[in-house]
Each structure stands twice: as C-alpha cells, then as structure tokens.
C-alpha cells in the first residue's frame, strides 16, 4: 500500500506514541520515518529534508499541530505536503479551523492500525488540499446550513464492548452476568491478556480493571494503555478493594474515569457504566462528523476549481467579444442596448466567480497580482452605462466625469478585479440612492489614480465603522453583505486603498478608491 520510498514525519510530544506510530507505519511497508516532538522541531526537519506526508498530534507544547499545519500551508515549498491530524478534539470550531486550513484527514483517538492505514490510503488517493478560508477562520454565512451527520441504523445497533479484567474467576463471572444483557462483554484474567485486547484491532469501549493482580497489576495495564494509540483514550474504571487516597490519586493520574470499591454493588456500578457509555457513543460519532465536514470542504474546493479554470477564462473571452461588438459603428441603438444587457449579465457572473474563488485566495494570502495596464476610464464608462440601464426605473442620474484629454488614463492592476469592484460599488450606490437623485463617478488624474463615487442617502450609523467587513448589510432584502467587503479586498489586492465618508448634514455617502497609476502624471 505504501511506496517504500516515501518519507513520513511523525510529530508527537509523547515519545512512546511516536514509537508506536512509527511501528505501525513500518508494518505497512514504510522504510523512511522521521520523528519530531513538537511543531517547531517538525518545521526545522521539513526545511532541511524531503517529507512526503506528515502525521501530527494536535495538542503539543511550543507549536501545536494546528500551528504546524498553518505554517506548512503558508510555505510555498511545503504547502502541498499531505497532512493527517491525530486528535481527540471535540470542539467543532477548532476542527473546522483545521479543515479550512487544508488538513487532508482527521484521525480520531483511539484508533487502530487498520484505521491509520485506511486514512493514509485515502489521503494518497485524494488531490492535494490548501487553505480555503482566511487566516484559519471559518466564517459561517447566515444562509449556509451547518452539516448534520446522521449515524446509520446499523451503527446504532452495534452494542458497545466492556472488557472486564480480574484474576479471580468468580469476579469475572459476577461482572459478566451484570452487563451481558446490555453490552458485548469480553473478559481477561491477567493484565497481559487485557493489554493485548486493548491494543488489538478490536479494542473495547470501556475497561473495568482490577488493580491487585499478579504479574502485571492494574496500574501497569493503565500506564501501557496510555502509551498506545489504539488504547490511549479508552475509559478505565478501577474496581478494587484498595481504599487509600494514594491509590486513588495514582489511578487518576493514569486517566481513570472512576473508582468502584469491592464488594461490588450492581445498583451503583451499572448506572456509572451506562453514563460513560453515553460519552463513548458520542465520541464514536466524531470520526463520522469529521469525515462529513472534510467531504463538504472538498466539494467546495471542487466547485472553486471548476469556476476558476473552466468558467472564468471563457467568460472573460465572451466579455471581450461583446465589448468589441459594442464598438462597431454598424450597430443600431436597439442592438447596442441588447448587447449591453448581455455584457452586464456576463459581468455579474464574472463577479460571482471572483467572489467565490479569487477572494478566498486573497483572504489566505495565496493571491499573487500580475499587474497590467488597465484602461480605468473605459471600464468605469461601461459600468456606468450598464447601471443607467439597470436602474432606469428609479430615474437616477449617474454622472461620469473624466478630466479633459485623459480618457486613456491607465491604472496598474487587474482589469477583471476593477470590473467587479466598481460594479459592486456602483450597484450599492444605486440601490441606496433615493429615486430621482444624482450619483456622481469622478476620475482624477493623480498618482495614485483616484476614483470617487458619491450618492444621496447616508450609510446607517450602526454599520459605518464596519462597512467593509464581511456579511455587513442593512435594509437590503436578500443582501449578502459581500459587495463592499469584496470591493475592499479587490482594491487592496491591487495595492490600492478604499475609504468611506458619510455626511448626515447633506444626507450623502462618498467612497474613494485609490489605485496605482500606470505612467506618470503630466
């Protein structure tokens, strides 16, 4: 299954866990395995040695697994390395943060060798992942439902397993009779046998463990359980005649979830076991939850890829042909009007692609500007003409002014970004402006170039301070709150600036955009 030439990096602050995971990888056929005890050490190894896959624990000192993931995805040379996160993390927000920072798989503790092998195989078969949301933050849009995972009925019907460990046959028989009707019961008469069951590919869900046994006692069993990924997180209830505080403290240090004193009272033990089995059931659903969340993220990435590669290029070509047709003198007014409508529709689709694709790259710092000269006056002129047609029923006057003789002024940026951002800004201004009012669009020959949009209607006071933030909208039915947010990102991605000024006295809103100028001011 594993190419013997592959190099694995195992990252865990607990040495026994590193050794066990390395042993599991070797059993799968891996020959080259590097180890690190925290994320910082892992990054040093990654900078100096070839690594084909990272398997990392989540909670570590100095640099956690999540911090390591972010560092890898932010490094251009390392960003495509497959990353499997091993975790008992149950907080949805933190798991989402890992998913949307490009983790390939999440493996929930406890796990078996078979589970690890399946995750590695799945990771190798899938395309590489990269971060898709900004700076590790997953923003819930109010109209996007969260994932609901349904556990299959067959999974519900599988009875949980209780392992009973005691060297006295009568105790084994008594405890078995208490739980056999409700759970699948396994027994072990020694610590060695118990450990073998716990570290097998069919581990129990809960262990009832006697402390005082010959050979390997209960404390030793618990200690070694915590040093193996298959048994590391299995709940242990100590059943003992020992009543001293020292024994209880030692048990708790080894991860015991409860103590039950001998002689056993079934009326006390049964509800305690039942309570912990509820936790076990919830924990078992984590892997299904995480798999579903990853599947949703991959679906989003597939859609993004389709839009970026399969739609954006042809659409830009369509817009170019439409603009060439509009410039032909042979077109009559009716034909020109129809072409303008088609052009506006195409630009709206392009705008949606920019919002759903390029914005994610800008947010995550993965966008690289290929700055080109842009005829900014021509773009503004086309957008103004389309806005006049779209909002004709409001009887709005949209005035566009270019300095005399400066029709060929050029910005240095991305033409498609300029279309999207000014279309959004002008559309917002037209929607906010009262009927029969005036909107002005002015282009100033400065360095940088300055574009000012002014409309009647003051931005509401409660959203002024966060006007350019994500999902901020008010008074617009069906508004997403992405228009001004995207405009700000698209301006800044072109090394420009955008600002808002509101006048309550004149009931007026002004947005100023500055973009790098191509050429010099004459």
Image: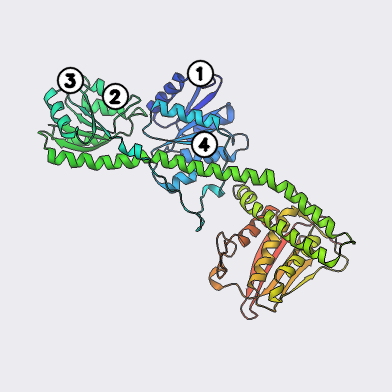
User: Pointer 1: residues within 10 angstroms few (<14), some, or many (20+)?
Assistant: some
Q: Which residue is mark 1?
A: 31
Q: Residue at x 57, y 38 (%)?
A: 129
Say which element carries label 2.
helix
Badge 4 vs badge 2, beta-carbon distance below 8 Å: no
Residue 515 in the image, given as x and y percentages of width and height: 74, 58
Tell me: 365 left or right of 190.
right
Residue drawn where x is 30% and y is 39% of the image: 280
Residue occupied by mark 3? 214
Q: What is the C-alpha distance between the residues marked 2 and 3? A: 18 Å
- Image quarter of residue 412: bottom right
Q: Residue 197 shows which numbered tag?
A: 2
The tag earlier along the polypeptide, 1 or 3, is 1
Of the two numbered discs 2 and 3 in the rendering, the one whose residue sits closer to the viewer: 2
3D distance between C-alphas at marks 1 and 4: 22 Å
Q: Secondary structure at mark 3?
A: loop
């Amino acid at each position: 299954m594993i190419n013997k030439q592959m190099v694995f990096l195992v990252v865990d602050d607990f040495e026994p866990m590193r050794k066990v995971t390395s042993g599991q990888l070797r059993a799968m056929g891996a020959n080259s395995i590097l180890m690190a005890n925290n994320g910082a050490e892992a990054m040093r190894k990654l900078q100096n040695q070839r690594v084909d896959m990272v398997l990392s624990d989540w909670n570590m000192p100095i640099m956690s697994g999540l911090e390591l993931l972010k560092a890898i995805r932010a490094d251009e040379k390392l960003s495509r390395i497959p990353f499997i996160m091993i975790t008992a993390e149950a907080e949805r927000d933190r798991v989402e943060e890992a998913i949307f920072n490009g983790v390939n798989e999440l493996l929930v503790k406890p796990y078996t060798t078979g589970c690890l092998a399946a995750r590695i195989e799945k990771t190798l078969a899938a395309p590489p992942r990269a971060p898709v949301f900004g700076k590790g933050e997953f923003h819930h849009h109010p109209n996007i439902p969260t994932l609901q995972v349904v556990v299959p009925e067959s999974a519900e019907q599988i009875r949980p397993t209780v392992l009973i460990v005691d060297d006295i046959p009568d105790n084994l028989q008594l405890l078995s009779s208490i739980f056999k009707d409700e759970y699948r019961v396994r027994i072990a008469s020694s610590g060695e046998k118990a450990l073998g069951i716990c570290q097998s590919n069919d581990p129990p869900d809960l262990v009832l463990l006697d402390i005082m046994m010959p050979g390997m006692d209960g404390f030793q069993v618990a200690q070694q359980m915590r040093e193996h990924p298959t048994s590391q997180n299995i709940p242990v209830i100590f059943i003992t005649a020992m009543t001293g505080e020292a024994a209880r403290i030692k048990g708790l240090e080894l991860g015991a979830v409860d103590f039950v004193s001998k002689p056993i009272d079934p009326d006390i033990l049964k509800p305690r076991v039942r309570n912990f089995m509820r936790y076990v059931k919830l924990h078992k659903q984590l892997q299904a939850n995480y798999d579903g969340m990853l599947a949703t993220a991959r679906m989003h990435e597939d859609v993004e890829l389709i839009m970026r590669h399969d739609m954006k290029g042809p659409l830009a070509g369509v817009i170019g042909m439409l603009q060439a047709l509009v410039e032909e003198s042979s077109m009559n007014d009716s034909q020109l009007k129809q072409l303008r409508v088609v052009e506006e529709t195409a630009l709206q689709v392009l705008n949606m692609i920019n919002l759903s694709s390029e914005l994610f790259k800008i947010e995550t710092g993965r966008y690289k500007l290929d700055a080109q000269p842009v005829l900014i006056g021509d773009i503004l002129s086309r957008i103004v003409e389309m806005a006049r047609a779209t909002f004709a029923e409001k009887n709005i006057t949209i005035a566009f002014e270019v300095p005399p003789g400066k029709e060929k002024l050029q910005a240095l940026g991305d033409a498609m970004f300029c279309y999207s951002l000014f279309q959004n800004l002008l559309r917002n201004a037209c929607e906010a402006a009262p009927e029969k009012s005036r909107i002005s669009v002015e282009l100033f020959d400065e360095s940088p170039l300055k574009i000012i949009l002014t409309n009647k209607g003051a931005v509401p006071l409660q959203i002024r301070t966060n006007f350019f933030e994500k999902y901020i909208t008010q008074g617009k039915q069906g508004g997403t709150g992405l228009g001004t947010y995207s405009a700000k990102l698209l301006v800044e991605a072109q090394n420009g600036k955008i600002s808002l000024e509101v006048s309550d006295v004149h009931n007026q809103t002004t947005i100023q955009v500055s973009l790098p100028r191509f050429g010099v001011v004459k």
